[in-house]
Image: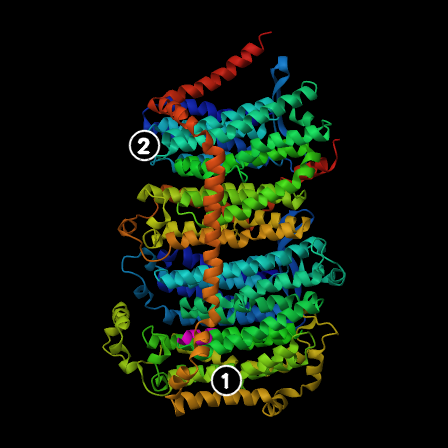
């Protein structure tokens, strides 16, 4: 039995305590954190290399009894749906450590440690196959995020952290009830894979679906439970925004695939029109809202919600293009949103403003940065040959196949996405130098160049050759679709 | 074999990467040498491909699989047939000329940037990188053997166009124009994507050959959700894409504004190549378009409106580049009408001749602009022919070709378009024929107006710099030229005039290829037309060689319309130069309508731009803030006070560290406790 998954979870978490031990020795804390992050990433590489794409089921499975009294197991495993997110998460952790390198001067060890712990916990979410284990990771991962926002956040951080907390509270409770119900009706099992085979009547299926919906929709976030996200992003430090956008938003979407669809397939089909409608509202309504934002972080936050609308849309049109497109979109959004928030962070570190109106003509002072920013903006607008195109294109094709008008509504993002992203670029990057502060901006440092270039490579590689990304998904997605097509009534 | 095909797009890409990413290392000369070398190699390889194709060697194959999902295999691959080969040669040739020309045009580009702008230090290299990147993208577009790569190239040329329109990013008008261009094109791409999506959904493939093979079956299908005939839905979707890229009414609004970009790209991108991508695409899709008379009818009417109404605007423009821009719109309308008339090869033929003579006109206009120290207003020109004889001669060639007079290239292609539209039998063809004829007259007028206004008559530039305040500031920016101490315009350097001369040769002679291109089965299977659309067949019967066509041409209406247009221009701008002002006053209202471009820009700004912001603002304020946050979330606002207390506690010390430890501790203790039995 391989223990790669356990290592992927626990290396960052125990590494974090080593980082804590560095105390006030900032330099040591930074280097230790970077070493831990690299170790965490290195351990995930064999997961991808050793992954057998032909196999639909769980791989790298670890199964140990945890609390035998309640039949709770320490059960881990990954399939083609989850493996990419573990890699993405571990990769983003490295970026976050580098991005916070000189920027965070206050409580460095704690800052780095919090991100490492979060990284480990989120790996846990993506590979937990026992419902209690999943729940523990799912809830625990919120705590470092509250703290990151609450301690290193902006002036209005208390409101933002509270809103975040309030939203997730209700969802968590409902999910807990659903889990207990499933435990009882499965005759005392928390094994997710066993739950997938459970026969459930329509009414309980609907109720289960709705309970999970509340929990996961908040995380995605779907309209109308999305308003915590812009506030959280605005108050979070750059690293917090990066992890929030790149990984945390994916947890909810992942939940749909692991819980809602396979456990309640009939309810999923029945409620698909609702899910599609909510997704399309997210794409269009939020697209319009993003257009009028004056704060860059808010704009990108709304853009994230709109892009996640494509993900949930892809899930509920029940074809391979849709689900795989949604997964690709999730990975791509991990790169692109991370890059966009890092770009805003680069500017914020210099000017201490996120207001679009405080910038203008940045390219004259920061030409290298401007090049990156325009590239990532184009990826955000879904330009072909960037990763942003692939997922949207697949979901759009899937949606048109499913229903022309759904595809029609979804495709409006071509115009809306370009409008809000490039209008921001126009006002920030182009034009004459906006004011005397902009005139004094210095171009990106080697450290900043490093993380932006890494992301640029990812964005372009995935856009030019997405084949390896989708290759690992096929078997699992196919399996899921077959599973969902069979009624459990 | 494949290697040769790969060289064509990759050589310019290599140049673009070197000039773009290593601009400091290679310097100016390095940047232009390597990009020109890349495009020259590409041009030679394209010629080799053309000869290959002439010897009957076509190619259709994949390079690599881009993506596979849901039974759909999406590849990057090439389809090399006569249609592609013609486009490859036209694109690489014009691109090569423009690359060389750019050495002269951008020589003093640092003057266009503020002194302290770091982006201005390598703008020269960046420009070459962009136009080479454009050449790569355009080649990928025309060489594609499937819809996905087509869409790639389609959006990539749009990206480069965006970057180049806004190249002089200090100018607010330029960065407004590039955003507008991108967004209007995205509206077109919206339709394009839906068309591609329908193809994928119903044909189960996005490979040209596979889809065209199923064309007959597609014709019989009704789209499930909408109840529309599938072929019509697909074709109209695809054509909406072409309307954006090829600037057809009402999506044409971005093209005139794109003139904010440096002139070389106006010639390369916004006249000769990119804007013709839509024409090329529809020709490529002829097996699909032939299935739907409704779509063809739509195409011909849109083309007709564009042709005539854009030509009319050209008459009142005073900016030399904008005259050429509106003339481009009108000519694109001709190509579109030819598509609607099922005369796809005629459209491609006009595309080719137009690429040459319009590139001449734009580059000639650019040469004038250099000589006038970046002045584009024709009211401040006049009498330039004495000072710039080469530019004058080439622009004259371009203008005659544009007006469609024999024996210049434009005559053959434009006359063929008109004839094809005349013979077309789809609904709307009659209207199109009228527009086509009227636009010939208008075309003669605006083409020669440009020549007479800028190159003949009074030398108005002599008093131009005294009278205007705005000009004085402008003048300061170009102190470099002022330092020469002379305001006398002079002929441009050889890097400018040689490309002009080289391009005027095909602007004169490329029309003579009509016999083999249109009636010699040159395009073979690449272009398809149904038997119900017999325009081409009739034209083939009536064709009796180049000289026969010319002899017949001078006896027909279009020729005399063009001549009268030219004569009117002569009368108004040489014989009675006082008349235009009088006419302007007499016909104040129509002139105003034309100057306001039928009010479309204002409408779009008001309805779409401001409207979208209005919707966004109300959704945000009313939806997000008032309803969701106000009612649902902040109803529990009192809790915030309590929560704030807890958070303050956390912040006060290292408490959260203990919190982490506690979580882990609880985890461990729980495990031990639960397992103690």
The residue where tag 1 is placed is B444
> What secondary structure do most residues of the magenta stretch adopt?
helix
Residue B338 percent across, percent down from the top left: 62, 75
Magenta region includes residue A210: no
Q: Is residue B580 above or below residue B50?
A: below
Q: Quadrant of residue B112?
A: bottom left
Residue at image point 46% right, 42% down: A301
- Residue A147 lies left or right of residue A489; in this view the side is left
SS at mark 2 in the image: loop
Let me know if residue B204 appears in the view.
Answer: no
Q: Which of label 1 and label 2 is nearer to you? A: 1
| Residue visible at 74% across and 74% down in the picture | B532
**Which secondary structure lies at badge 1?**
helix
The reply to whether callout 1 and callout 2 are in contact (CB within 8 Å) is no
Q: Are marks 1 and 2 on the same chain?
A: no
Q: Nearer the viewer, residue A118 or A102?
A: A118
Q: Quadrant of residue B177?
A: bottom left
Q: Residue B487: x, y in percent?
A: 27, 79
Task: Please tell me which residue lies in front, B611 or A156.
Answer: B611
Query: Residue B378, position in %: x, y?
Result: 37, 79
**Residue at mark 2:** A105
Quadrant (top left/top right/bottom left/bottom right) for the N terminus of chain A: top right
Image coords of residue A184 (percent x, y)? 67, 19
The chain holding disc 2 is: A
Subunit of label 1: B
**Distance between the alpha carbons at the discs numbered 1 and 2:** 71 Å
Range of residues picked out in magenta: B319-325
């Amino acid at each position: 039995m391989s223990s790669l998954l356990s290592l992927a979870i626990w290396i960052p978490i125990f590494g974090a305590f080593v980082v804590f031990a560095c105390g006030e020795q900032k330099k040591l804390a930074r280097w230790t954190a970077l070493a831990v992050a690299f170790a965490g990433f290195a351990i995930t590489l064999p997961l991808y290399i050793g992954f057998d794409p032909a196999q639909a089921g769980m791989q790298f499975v670890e199964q140990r009894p945890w609390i035998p009294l309640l039949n709770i197991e320490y059960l881990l495993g990954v399939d083609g749906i989850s493996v990419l997110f573990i890699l993405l998460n571990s990769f983003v952790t490295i970026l976050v450590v580098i991005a916070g390198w000189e920027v965070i001067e206050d409580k460095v060890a704690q800052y780095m440690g919090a991100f490492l712990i979060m990284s480990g916990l989120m790996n846990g979410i993506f590979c937990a196959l026992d419902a209690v284990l999943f729940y523990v990771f799912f809830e625990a991962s919120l705590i470092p995020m509250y703290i990151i926002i609450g301690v290193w956040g902006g002036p209005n951080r208390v409101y933002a952290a509270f809103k975040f907390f309030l939203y997730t509270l209700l969802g968590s409770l409902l999910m807990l009830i659903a889990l207990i119900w499933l435990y009882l009706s499965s005759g005392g099992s928390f094994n997710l894979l066993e739950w997938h085979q459970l026969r459930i009547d329509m009414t309980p299926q609907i109720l289960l679906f709705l309970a999970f919906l509340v929990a996961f929709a908040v995380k995605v976030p779907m309209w109308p439970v999305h308003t915590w996200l812009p506030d959280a992003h605005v108050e979070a430090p750059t690293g917090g925004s990066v992890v929030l956008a790149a990984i945390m938003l994916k947890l909810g979407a992942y939940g749909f695939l692991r819980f809602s669809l396979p456990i309640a397939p009939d309810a999923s089909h029945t409620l698909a029109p609702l899910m599609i409608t909510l997704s399309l509202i997210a794409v269009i309504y939020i697209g319009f809202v993003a257009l009028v934002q004056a704060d860059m972080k808010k704009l990108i936050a709304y853009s994230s919600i709109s892009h996640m609308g494509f993900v949930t849309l892809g899930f509920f049109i029940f074809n391979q293009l849709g689900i795989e497109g949604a997964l690709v979109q999730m990975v791509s959004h991990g790169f692109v949103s991370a890059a966009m928030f890092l770009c805003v962070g680069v500017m914020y570190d210099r000017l201490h403003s996120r207001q679009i109106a405080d910038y203008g003509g940045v390219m004259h002072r920061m030409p290298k940065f401007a090049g990156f920013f325009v590239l990532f903006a184009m990826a955000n607008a879904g330009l072909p040959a960037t990763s942003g195109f692939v997922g949207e294109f697949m979901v759009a094709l899937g949606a048109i196949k499913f229903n022309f008008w759904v595809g029609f509504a979804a495709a409006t993002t071509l115009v809306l996405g370009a409008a809000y992203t490039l209008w921001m670029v126009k006002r920030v990057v182009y034009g004459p130098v906006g004011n005397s502060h902009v005139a004094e901006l210095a171009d990106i440092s080697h450290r900043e160049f490093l993380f932006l270039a890494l992301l640029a490579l990812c964005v372009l590689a995935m856009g030019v050759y997405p084949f390896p990304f989708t290759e690992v998904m096929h078997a699992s997605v196919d399996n899921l679709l077959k599973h969902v097509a069979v009624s459990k009534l | 074999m494949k290697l040769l095909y790969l060289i064509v797009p990759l050589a310019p890409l290599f140049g673009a990467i070197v000039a773009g990413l290593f601009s400091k290392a290679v310097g100016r000369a390095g940047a232009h040498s390597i990009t020109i070398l890349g495009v020259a190699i590409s041009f030679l390889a394209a010629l080799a491909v053309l000869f290959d194709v002439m010897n009957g060697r076509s190619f259709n194959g994949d390079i690599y699989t881009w993506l596979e999902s849901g039974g759909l295999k999406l590849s990057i691959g090439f389809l090399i047939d006569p249609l592609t080969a013609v486009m490859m040669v036209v694109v690489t040739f014009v691109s090569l000329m423009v690359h060389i020309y750019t050495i002269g045009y951008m020589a003093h580009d640092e003057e266009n940037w503020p002194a302290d702008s770091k982006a201005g230090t390598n703008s020269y290299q960046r420009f070459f990188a962009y136009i080479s990147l454009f050449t790569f993208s355009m080649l990928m577009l025309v060489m594609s053997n499937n819809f996905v790569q087509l869409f790639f190239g389609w959006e990539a040329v749009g990206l480069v166009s965006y970057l180049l329109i806004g190249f002089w990013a200090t100018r607010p008008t330029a960065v407004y124009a590039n955003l507008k261009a991108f967004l209007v094109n995205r509206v077109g791409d919206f339709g394009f994507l839906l068309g591609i999506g329908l193809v994928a959904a119903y044909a189960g493939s996005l490979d040209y050959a596979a889809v065209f093979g199923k064309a007959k079956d597609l014709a019989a299908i009704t789209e499930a959700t909408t109840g529309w005939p599938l072929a019509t839905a697909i074709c109209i979707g695809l054509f909406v894409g072409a309307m954006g890229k090829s600037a057809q009414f009402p999506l044409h609004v971005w093209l005139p504004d794109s003139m904010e970009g440096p002139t070389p790209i106006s010639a390369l991108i916004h006249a000769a190549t990119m804007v013709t991508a839509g024409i090329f695409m529809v020709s490529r899709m002829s097996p699909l378009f032939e299935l739907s008379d409704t779509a063809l009818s739509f195409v011909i009417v849109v083309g007709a409106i564009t042709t005539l109404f854009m030509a009319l605007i050209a008459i009142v423009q005073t900016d030399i580049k904008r005259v050429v821009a509106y003339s481009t719109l009108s000519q694109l309308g001709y190509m579109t009408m030819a598509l609607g008339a099922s005369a796809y090869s005629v459209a491609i033929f006009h595309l080719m001749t137009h690429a040459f003579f319009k590139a001449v006109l734009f580059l000639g206009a650019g040469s004038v602009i250099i000589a006038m120290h970046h002045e584009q207003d024709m009211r401040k020109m006049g009498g330039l022919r004495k000072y710039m004889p080469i530019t004058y001669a080439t622009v004259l060639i371009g203008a005659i070709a544009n007006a469609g007079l024999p024996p210049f290239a434009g005559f053959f292609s434009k006359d063929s378009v008109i004839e094809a539209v005349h013979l077309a039998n789809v609904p709307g063809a009659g209207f199109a024929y009228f527009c086509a004829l009227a636009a010939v007259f208008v075309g003669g007028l605006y083409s020669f107006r440009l020549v007479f206004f800028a190159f003949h008559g009074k030398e108005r530039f002599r008093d131009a710099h005294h009278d205007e305040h705005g000009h004085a500031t402008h003048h300061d920016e170009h102190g470099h030229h002022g330092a020469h101490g002379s305001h006398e315009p002079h002929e441009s350097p050889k890097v400018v005039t040689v490309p002009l001369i080289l391009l005027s040769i095909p602007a004169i002679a490329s029309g003579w290829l009509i016999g083999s291109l249109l009636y010699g089965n040159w395009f073979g299977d690449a272009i398809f037309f149904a038997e119900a659309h017999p325009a081409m067949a009739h034209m083939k019967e009536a064709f009796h060689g180049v000289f026969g066509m010319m002899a017949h041409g001078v006896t027909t209406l279009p020729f005399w319309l063009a001549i009268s247009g030219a004569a009117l221009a002569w009368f108004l701008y040489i014989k009675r130069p006082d008349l235009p002002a009088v006419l302007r006053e007499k016909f104040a209202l129509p002139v105003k309508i034309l100057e306001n471009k039928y009010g479309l820009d204002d409408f779009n700004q008001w309805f779409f731009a401001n409207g979208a912001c209005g919707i966004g603002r109300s959704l945000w304020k009313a939806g997000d803030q008032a309803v969701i946050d106000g009612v649902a979330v902040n109803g529990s606002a009192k809790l915030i006070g309590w929560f704030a207390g807890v958070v303050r506690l956390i912040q006060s010390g290292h408490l959260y560290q203990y919190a982490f430890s506690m979580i882990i501790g609880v985890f461990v203790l729980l495990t031990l406790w639960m397992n103690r039995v």
